[in-house]
Image (spheres, rainbow, N blue to C red):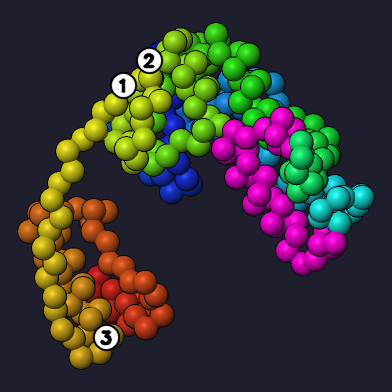
Amino acid sequence: MKRRTIVVEGPLAFRMRRIVAARRAEAGIQIMTLPQLAARLAGGFVRPARSQDLDPAIRTALEAGGFSDLEGIRELPGMTRSVAWTLTRVWDADFSLADCANGSARLLDLARIESDVRTHLPPGVLTPRDLRDLALQRVSLAPSVLGDVELDRVVRVAPVWRPLLQALARCVRLAWRDPGTADITWFPGEVDAEARAEPAAPDIVSCAAPRAEVVEALRWLRELVSSGRARPEEVAICATTTGDWDNDMLVLATDAG
């Protein structure tokens, strides 16, 4: 059995790719996000830091006080969330606060908070940069741990993960299927961009009330399925908010069988 790794972006893409793998009876496939890939390669019991890990560590760092620039606002509501947002952006950008903090009181405070957060994270929980660096030390194990790596419709790769992918390209086959951005000059692997189908022209039907709209939607669905133009799982009936249609949809769909 040949092992390979599929990298996706977000929980919906994760579930959809698992469904595709099950329908194709694919064996030896691992589906994960980039932080999970780094953790898998880093080995042991390490994992990326999540919000439930970061928030307590940030609160502990802020409660210590003694900051130069942030002292007057460290107890304000929302400060923990703002610091978490800032650190996440800093880590994704692969920016070293410790190396660039000289001369800036705000950056010095953030660098101190970052250091305290790393100290107070649970055992085995790492920030993205630390996780990336640990994975880079074990990149030679990628052929046996990860196998071929494919980015499946990943829209964007944060700079923090790019050195890891560049190192993986020297050890395993690396591909990116349908990149969602034009900024792929840094990517050293294969790029597989599928031709996009032209969007269909919309048909507009005017209805008098939500119940009539539900009837027309169910008729459309039945026509597509009965004519063989689509399978039920390929059809979606959606709205930005569904409250006005929920009751009618439940009743009419049940009556329609």
- The correct choice, above or below, for 221 with respect to 63 in the image is below
Q: Position of residue 110 (x, y in %)?
A: 76, 44
Q: State yes or no: discs 1 and 3 in contact (Cβ < 8 Å).
A: no
Identity of the residue drawn at 33% across and 71% down = 239
Q: Determine whether, in the image, residue 49 is placed left or right of residue 18.
A: right
Residue on which disc 2 sits: 173
Q: Nearer the viewer, residue 209 or 55?
A: 55
Q: State yes or no: discs 2 and 1 in contact (Cβ < 8 Å).
A: yes
Q: Residues within 10 Å of mark 1 (few under 14, many from 20)?
A: few
Q: Nearer the viewer, residue 159 or 175?
A: 159
Residue on which disc 3 sits: 211
Residue projecting furthest to the front: 103
Identity of the residue drawn at 77% across and 67% down = 77
Q: Amino acid at mark 3?
A: Arg
- The correct choice, above or below, for 138 with respect to 8 in the image is above
Tell me the tag on residue 190: 1
Magenta-highlighted residues? 72-101
